[in-house]
Image: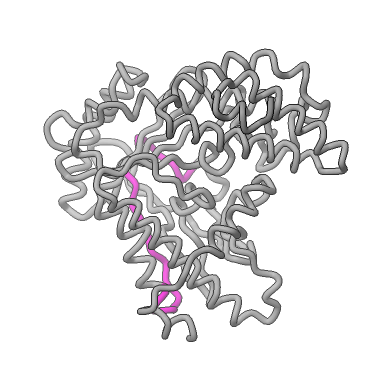
Amino acid sequence: MTLQEIERSYDPERLLKKLTEQSHEDLLSGKTRDYAFGKFAFDLHALWRQAGAQGRSETFLKDLLEASKTIEADLPEPLKKSGETVFEKQQPSLAEAIRETAKRLLFCERLLKNLPPSVIGVILGGSISYGPFYNVREEPDSSDLDIFFIVGQEFFQGDHAQHVIAEDRGFRRSACDDFTLRSRIFQRLWNEGKADLISLKSPIDDYLASIKVFPRETFIKEFDTELGDMIQADEDAVALVRDYKQGPYARTYLNTIFPRYNFSHRPYDFRLTEEYPPEGGAIVNLPATIISDGHLYTGQHHNHIIPSFDVEYDTDGSITTSIDHFKKHLKQRFEVERKRALDPSQLEFINCSDRRPILSPQMIELAQRTIDSIAYPPSNSEYIGK
């Protein structure tokens, strides 16, 4: 049976066997471990997307999780082993990455059902976005599941927040109670102009869900309007986004330094600061966008969705539009900096990602294909030639 025939059947066991055969062939032909691993992961992710388009995502993931328990014996030896240690975290084996990705995506399936109308959009971020079936780790240093919710102000009124962060969706009671309380506090902080979004970390089985809830205005500002204005101005500036978290955050980073990167992958050492409202928690000042010495450094939340840029849920198309604008802004700035550079070959679009060292070859290629496919808006033609 060919891979195309298996695709139409959405049989994860057969798919894994076929992808395993391909990985053996890739390694025998001289391809690197990273290439063979990345191709397996990239193709498996595409097959999951196809199953989702047919309304079979949840069944596919459950069957995949079961099939992954027996795959390891047949894998090429290099893919059975864990990867290198990067950012002080050992990268997973293939079987581990498949299991851990499927578990998190199944949680997402449950989380995205029957959302209240105040939820406008949902985006998956972090390793489940830039490295599905490739970078997602198990315990003892398991990968967080990063999820962005974009909401209207009514989300913080009534019981909308409680319908999303709820025990029947997999959250622990303590996390639900904390979020309910802090949502009310956030509404006041928002009205007083002291916080821009609220976040939550909650244990889900043997990993953490890292939830960020953006009012629509914050999201559009961070990914579109403010970013575009800063690029147009082309002056040194640092834009902040204030995240209301459960507790102190900056102290978890050595010397509170939080590096951001430009298109040459050179760092800007951003120093985290935070404030402590009397009701509890911490308001952390995170980098939204930085322009320094003629270079753009992408923000904390930007890096969560580069290079996949996938929107999982969008009620009215506004979130997809903002992400399209985000990509165009990045493309415009990349072209300007490449034009100015003494050695343009040193610049790559994907270098702006802080996860660049752990991305698969296929994700790096996807990033370049994505940026190459974007056309400039005619209204910005004067800026491009600047």
What residue do we see at 81% from left, 27% from top? 76
Residue 248: image location, x then y, percent? 40, 39
Q: Which picture quadrant has residue 109?
A: top left
Vertical comparison of 280 with 162: above or below? below
Tell me what residue is drawn at x 47 percent, y 17 percent: 205
Q: Is residue 367 left or right of residue 118?
A: right
| Figure label count | 0
Which percent across, then down, holds residue 158? 12, 32
Q: Position of residue 267 (x, y in %)?
A: 60, 61
Q: Position of residue 386 (x, y in %)?
A: 48, 86
Residue under the image location 59 percent in, 82 percent down = 340
Query: How is the rendered protein coloured?
Result: one colour
Which residue occupies the extreme left position in the image? 158
Q: Nearer the viewer, residue 288 or 27?
A: 27
- Using the image as rendered, state which of residue 168 and residue 201 is in the foreground: 168
Q: Is residue 177 magenta?
A: no
Q: Is residue 367 above or below residue 158?
A: below
The range drawn in magenta is: 231-251
Q: Quadrant of residue 45?
A: top right
Up/down of 58 relative to 157, above or below: above
Question: Residue 175 or 273: which is nearer the viewer?
Answer: 175
Residue 245 painted magenta: yes
Quarter of the image that includes the N terminus:
top right
Residue at x 30%, y 17% (from the top left corner)? 167
